[in-house]
Image (cartoon, rainbow, N blue to C red):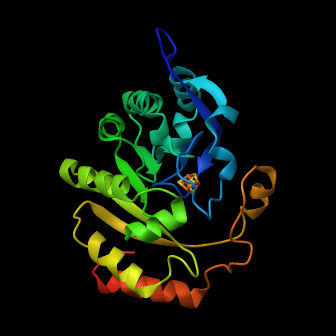
Amino acid sequence: MTMEANNGVSGYIHSVESFGGVDGPGVRYIVFLQGCPLRCIYCHNPDSRKMSVGILTNSASVAEEIEGYIPFIKNGGVTLSGGEPLAQPEFAADILRRCKDMGLHTALDTSGYGGTVAVLKVLKYTDLVLLDIKAYSGKLYTAVTGMSEDKAKALLEMCEKLAIKVRIRHVVVPGYTDEPNEEQMLARYLSKFNCIDRVEPIPFHKMGEYKWKDIDEEYELYGTPEADEKTMDKVKEIFTREGLKL
Ligand code: SF4
């Protein structure tokens, strides 16, 4: 990643979606940044994890493209997703800065996996964080991502201090993250944060399974069922009992 005089900051993207409807309020332009240090066993975009296979571009070009969509997204905004946008903090921050200069609402769809300095750079230009919390306990978090949960929790604490609105996402995977005690600990932990606007439990699904066939990593969940309605209802009940808004 380098600074260039006229083109802003260079970085890698995976793809874009010009009329996104689920990653933040209103109609949104979504930029999927390439690269993610996590190794979630249920990753639905495993092709976005390896940085070197992304499309090299720069923040000025990305912002210029977004500018053309302002008439459609002016009541929605722009979301940076991934991969993990915090894996390229200067690039992400410069795209969001340019979006704020255009008067657009900005959202960051993240697992929280970034260093403090890097995260603060990006949060400076972020209106809403969509934080994907994989699990509460370190043991389970590591089992499903290969990493420690510390950075996700640190990001949530930073948002609380900076009063940045957070929407929590949490994937419910049968046999892994649907365990009631785990969900109870997560719900209790989340209930302490005023910055959390609402929590969105997401059922594990198999729609991205085919993508694993094209990458050089083993998929462990071929035999795992999708999270059914009963499982989701149980999880939702735990969250609402702790006073969290769904
Ligand atoms: S954080 Fe997202 S992109 Fe990264 S491995 Fe997990 S699910 Fe995949």
Above-or-below relation of 103 to 4: below
Above-or-below relation of 92 to 211: above
From the top left corner, tell me how far across and down residue 45 is, in percent.
65, 53
Q: Nearer the viewer, residue 158 or 61?
A: 158
From the top left corner, tell me how far across and down residue 66 is, in percent.
55, 32
From the top left corner, tell me how far across and down residue 38 is, in percent.
53, 52
Task: Please state if 192 lies on the left or on the right of 218 as rendered.
Answer: left
Q: In the image as oriented, which residue stretches furthest toward the left?
A: 161
What is the total number of numbered labels drawn onto the structure image? 0
Kindly identify the residue that appears in the image at 59 percent across and 51 percent down.
20
Residue 237 seen in the figure: yes
Residue 134 seen in the figure: no
Kindly identify the residue that appears in the image at 31 percent across and 87 percent down.
241
Image quadrant containing the C terminus: bottom left
Kindly identify the residue that appears in the image at 71 percent across and 70 percent down.
206
From the top left corner, tell me how far across and down residue 223 is, in percent.
73, 78
Q: Nearer the viewer, residue 23 or 10?
A: 10
Q: Nearer the viewer, residue 202 or 19?
A: 202
Task: Please state if 137 lies on the left or on the right of 228 as rendered.
Answer: left
Specify the quadrant of the image occupied by residue 122: top left
Kindly identify the residue that appears in the image at 52 percent across and 60 percent down.
145
Q: In the image as oriented, which residue stretches furthest toward the top?
A: 5
Above-or-below relation of 230 to 114: below
Where on the image, by quarter, is ligand 1?
A: bottom right
